[in-house]
Image: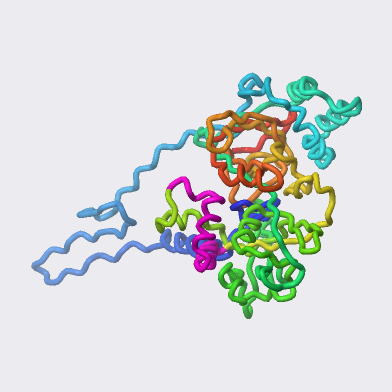
Amino acid sequence: MIRRRGGNGGGNGYWLGAWVAMALLLGACAKLDKVDAPAPAVTATPATPAAPAQAQCPAPIPCPACAACPAPKPEPPVAKVPVLEAVGFDALPGWAGDDVAAAWSAFLASCNAMRFQPAWRSACTEAARLNGAGAPDAARVRAYFESNFIAYRVATPEGNTQGLATGYYEPLLRGSRTRRAPFLHALYAPPDDLLVIDLISVNPDLKNMRLRGRIEGRRVVPYWSRAEIERGMAPVSGKEIVWVDNAIEAFFLEVQGSGRIRLESGDMLRLNYADQNGHPYQSIGRWLLDRGELKAGEATMQGIKAWAVANPKRVEELLAQNPSYVFFRELPGGNPKEGPIGAQGLPLTPERSIAIDPRFIPLGSPVFLSTTYPNTDTRLERLVIAQDTGGAIRGPVRADYFWGFGAEAGAQAGRMRQALRLWVLLPKGFPLPQN
């Protein structure tokens, strides 16, 4: 899925220009480190004593009359706090009351995908054994996790345990296999000139980071932005999968990362994220807020759609504010009761699957979240499975909650922006990442 994210399943569409800028910055830093000491000042006449030379020092250290700049005062070290800290299961609010069995089938699917990984083998073997006697009830599922897993409180390196929960869903659009009114807005498969560079081949520390661009002459340059693609600058002709009847709905399909299209014939097709142009996601809601087009609290999916209905001639201008652009792939029809495919390659389970940042929470892990329902104080505390990722889901205490398919799920997802706490459940003996 995408959801203000720019990438699916580790795609992480890092903009090529940003890396070029970083390289230039590093080069500049290297030059600053090698600045030679200034030559002594030359006196004007023998009768006038020379003023002491002032060393060239980086701002903001003042050197009004010193021959050499004082060394900058070191900043006090920031205390390191583990991102993952082991706690008892009684520290998880609502753990004893949640119907944890509702997440069991999603967990088994993830376990099946991870069962050959040494860190998961024992726990997944035990899960399969437990399931062999029939789907266990909540009490048996709870006992299984308490016996085989350790709960870890998730925090930032600075010790902050509160983060952000947003929501996403699988939308339904109307479309046609051929372009004709009102179906004028194409959804494309990835173009042939989109270049994807996996940075792990450059540096193992850059695992899951990829550059996207295109070749121009003998140079690799950033890929076309959304506005440039819409102006016909990218070779996307012939890559159309389907045309839909609403530009803003097509945009939010990109934001969600997957969806269903009902064709004029009544047939249904499913689209899923395939790739992205590499530009970072920019919030069109923030653009509307900054210009005074919407008030605080109105920059939800519903509020943006309402603005688009009231300002149809400005929709193109609005969408151009986000240079990120998503390309799709068509999936087989499959089971309409199943959710879309997430980053783990498995169907998502409504209200029991989330997207996380895999740098901090392993993909496929059970996670216990504590948040509230959108725009309420009603507690939402339950066991979910980390089965998806995304470019805008960044940081340890961050989750995108999958609500399911259709308008009702979309209404919840569009309003969700809640405070969040997380605990990740990892098998006993799981090798923790080094902070």
Measured as percent of width and height from the top left, residue 335 is found at 84, 48
> Residue 245 occupies which quadrant of the picture?
bottom right
> Residue 180 occupies which quadrant of the picture?
bottom right
Q: Judge whether residue 86 is colored magenta.
A: no
**Between 254 and 306, which is closer to the camera in this rendering?**
306
Q: Identify the residue at horizontal 74%, vertical 67% (top origin).
A: 176
Q: Judge whether residue 316 is colored magenta.
A: yes
Q: Which residues are magenta?
A: 296-323
> Residue 144 occupies which quadrant of the picture?
top right
Measured as percent of width and height from the top left, residue 193 is found at 69, 73
Q: Identify the residue at horizontal 71%, vertical 46% (top origin).
A: 405
Measured as percent of width and height from the top left, residue 188 is found at 70, 67
The count of marks equals: 0
Q: Which residue is outermost to the left?
A: 47
Q: Is residue 198 left or right of residue 374?
A: right
Measured as percent of width and height from the top left, residue 373 is found at 58, 35
Placement of the C terminus among the 4 image quadrants: top right
**Between 122 and 141, which is closer to the camera in this rendering?**
141
Q: Is residue 269 left or right of residue 294?
A: right
Q: Which residue is outermost to the bottom?
A: 217
Q: Identify the residue at horizontal 80%, vertical 21% (top origin).
A: 140
Most common secondary structure along the magenta stretch: helix
Observer able to see residue 359: no
